[in-house]
Structures are given as C-alpha cells and as structure tokens.
Amino acid sequence: MKDFRQMKQRGEKITALTAYDYPTARLLDESGIDIILVGDSVGMVVLGYQDTTRVTLEEMLHHTRAAARGVKQALLVADMPIHSYNAPEQAVETAKRLVDAGAQAVKLEGGASHVAQIEAITEAGITFMAHIGMLPQSVREEGGYRVKGRTQSEAETLLADAHAVEKAGAFSVVLEIVLADVAKQITNAIDIPTIGIGSGEHCDGQILVTHDLIGLFPWFTPKFVSPEARVSEEIRRAARAFIEKTRSGGKI
Ligand code: KIV
C-alpha cells in the first residue's frame, strides 16, 4: 500500500475514482490511479436505483469481486452499504466479507457517531477510509444533497468528525460536498489525507464517480463535475450505426 500520509506531507495529490466492474477497474488501474473505490454509488449509476439506500451487501460483494479481478497496483476500497454497520460487531463482520471479496480497505459513512464501528474495524487489522460531510446514505432524512459546513456549528461538527475518525484509525477521509474553506481548514488540521468530492481544490486528493467523469450517466451530472468525455454519446452513436447497418442488410 502506498504511504498516503507521506503523499500528504509531500504535497503530492491523491487520485481516486470509482469502479464496479472488471474492465473499468482494469482501465483505471492501468491509467495509474492511486485508489479505486467500489462505491455504493453503484446503486445509482449501474443498478438504476434512485439513491444508495437500497444497495445491499450482496450487491457490494458481487461488484467488489469483479473490480478486484482488474486491479494490480491501486488500493481497492469497498463501500459498506447502509444497514451493514449498525453495531461494531456487524461492522467488523461486513468489513471482513468485503476483504474476502478482494477489497484492501473499506469505507463507511459517518464521523464521531461511528467511532465504535471504525475502532472495531481498524482493531481487526482492516484498513479503513472514513467519509464525512454530505452522506448519501442519509439523503432521505436530509431531504436532498446539500453543501455541508455553511454554518459555524456545522463547520465545527465536521472538524470534530475529522479528528474523531483520524483518532479511530482511518488512513484517509472523504469530504463530500463540504464548503471549500471548511475543507481547507480540515485538511490543515489533521495528519491523514482528505479526499474531496465537490469540496474544492485544497483537499489532499480528489475522488469522483467515474460515470460522472466520463459522461456515462448523462441523465444527471453533479454541478461540481466537468466531464472529460462523453461516453454515452459514443455508445448511442455505435448502437445507431449497428441498427442502421443491420436493418439495411449491410456488413457488420
Ligand atoms: O459511493 C461512492 O461513489 C462514494 C464517493 C462519492 C465518495 O462514496
């Protein structure tokens, strides 16, 4: 495993993208990405659910196995889905199953509220990535995807969360849709790297959902993403060409 703390100290940015299948994981790995996340965003961009709250552990295990077959050099992190870490014992059991499926680290959503689960996981010798800020598994209670850290009290809570997960043994922490200034403050306050998504450029690294980056989920793109490709247009173009050629009796 790369030394991500040292990367932070050296000011070397950490790169992370999601993958849920063998070809994508292999392509990202061959591109030199540092971290591949089998995110529970698989529920939205692959399985067609409205949000991540329906993703099951069986689904995460299935996609983790597939992605693991394609990864040689990146750190493969798997998301623990909702309801799979309600208590410390359950969290360790879930983390072990994901590791058996090929993950080298696991991630769950929550800060100070989940210290018992995080400590149980790290004490079991499993590498752990934290996730604070906007927590997609709580989107229904929250009533939407909202920027975090706008108020003084929210910023203080986020800072306390970051310190709590660092103390509990996390090797890094994802900051999701956190106000850029607050993300910067957190990044300067802790020794483990912050990996931002929609949280400004001051984080120690950046993560995106690959489908957003490559334009493979054209029906919704988060405001903070500037796609680098339009893969959905290529798929439509190729499919239309195939349909046309087949219907006209042309050579495929
Ligand atoms: O599920 C996911 O893809 C994630 C990233 C957005 C950080 O958790």
Image (spheres, grey):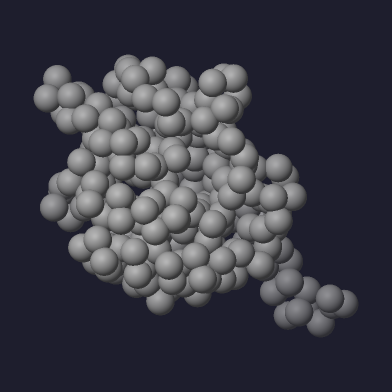
* Left or right of 124 in this view: 118: left
Instruction: Please state which of residues 63 and 139 is positioned toward the viewer in this rendering.
Output: 63
* Left or right of 116 in this view: 236: right
* Left or right of 224 in this view: 89: left
Quadrant where the image shows the C terminus: bottom right
Compared to 185, does 198 lie above or below? below
Q: Position of residue 169 (x, y in %)?
A: 37, 42
Q: Position of residue 236 (x, y in %)?
A: 62, 61
Instruction: Please state which of residues 38 and 9 is positioned toward the viewer in this rendering.
Output: 9
Quadrant where the image shows the N terminus: top right
Write the residue at 55% across / 42% down. Answer: 16
Write the residue at 67% across / 58% down. Answer: 71
Q: Position of residue 180 (x, y in %)?
A: 35, 22
Write the residue at 43% across / 38% down. Answer: 172
Q: Is residue 162 something one can see in this rendering?
A: yes
In which quarter of the view is residue 181 placed? Answer: top left
Write the residue at 34% across / 35% down. Answer: 166
Q: Is residue 218 something one can see in this rendering?
A: no
Q: Position of residue 242 (x, y in %)?
A: 73, 72
Compared to 175, does 118 lie above or below? below
Compared to 210, does 60 lie above or below? below
Compared to 91, does 32 lie above or below? above
Instruction: Please state which of residues 140 and 161 is positioned toward the viewer in this rendering.
Output: 161
